[in-house]
Amino acid sequence: MLSQKCYLGDVRNKKVIILIILLLLAATAAAAYYFYFLPKKETPTEDANPPAEEGPTLIDFKGQYVKGEVPNDWTIVEYQNGNGSDMLTEGVTYTGLTGLEIKNPAAAVVFKLKAVYGIGGAGGCSTYFKFTDDSAVYYNGLASDNTEVGMAAPTIVDLQGLPYSPLSIFGTSARRIGTKLYWDTIPAATYFEAACGMQENLFEFTSPQFGVGGGETHGTYQFTVLSSASVADLETLDSILNSLAVN
């Protein structure tokens, strides 16, 4: 009986060992299949230098009088010798740049300059554009000028704290809020003394300028911005205006 029990025990032990071996073989086979035969999902690698977001392609514009950088689907048009402006007195000979247009891809004039000569108007400022860095001395001077011509002190338009786009247009410091441009009448000062009254929409450039009557030169240009211009067009216009220079 004892030998029979030992025999049965040995058989059970062998079965257990065989079962363990079979399980180990199955596990090994599964591991081999997983690592060597099962298709693996590729883990996307992060590009250490992702491509920069491409902006509009800029081209160099060089006209007869001005130059700058414009997107390849925008256009700058120059006018000369009295053309391109209805702000010039008739009967006078004009030479040089008397008009300029900046057009968007739809051919809409987003910005325009027109030479001005011989066009008068009433003095004084009915409104005063107040930026955070304005000058009290400048305002008091305008109020005094109004008094001299029988006008009330300028009504203050408070622009303090409003975001604006800084511009330099042919070296003239300006700021854009929406479709409205403001320019600094005293660039050498540390303040921003925004133009008002007759000067509000008239740049006074030292360059460019146009000739009058074969002798004098003047740099007064009326400017307008398309009132229905989109935000994208206005941002592109900012870039173009900042790039403008005289040849």
Image: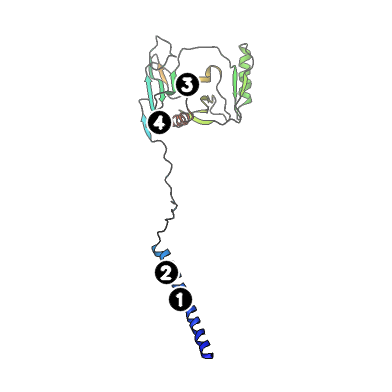
Task: Quote the CA–CA distance across marks 2 and 1.
Answer: 12 Å
Task: Quote the CA–CA distance across marks 4 and 3.
Answer: 19 Å
Tag shown at residue 29: 2
Task: Quote the CA–CA distance across marks 2 and 3.
Answer: 80 Å
Tag shown at residue 155: none
- Residue 27, image x, y percentages: 46, 69
Residue that numbered label 1 is attached to: 21
Who comes first in sequence, dot 3 or dot 1?
Answer: 1
Decide if residue 210 is in sight here. Answer: yes
Q: Residue at x 47, y 21 (%)?
A: 223
- Residue 18, image x, y percentages: 46, 78
Tag shown at residue 224: 3
Label 2: few (<14), some (14–19) or many (≥20) C-alpha neighbours in 10 Å: few
The residue type indicated by label 4 comes to Gly
Who comes first in sequence, dot 4 or dot 1?
Answer: 1
Who comes first in sequence, dot 4 or dot 2?
Answer: 2
Residue mark closest to the camera, 3 vs 1 = 1
Residue mark closest to the camera, 4 vs 2 = 2
Between 32 and 166, the residue placed more toward the observer is 32
The residue type indicated by label 1 comes to Ile
Decide if residue 66 is in sight here. Answer: no
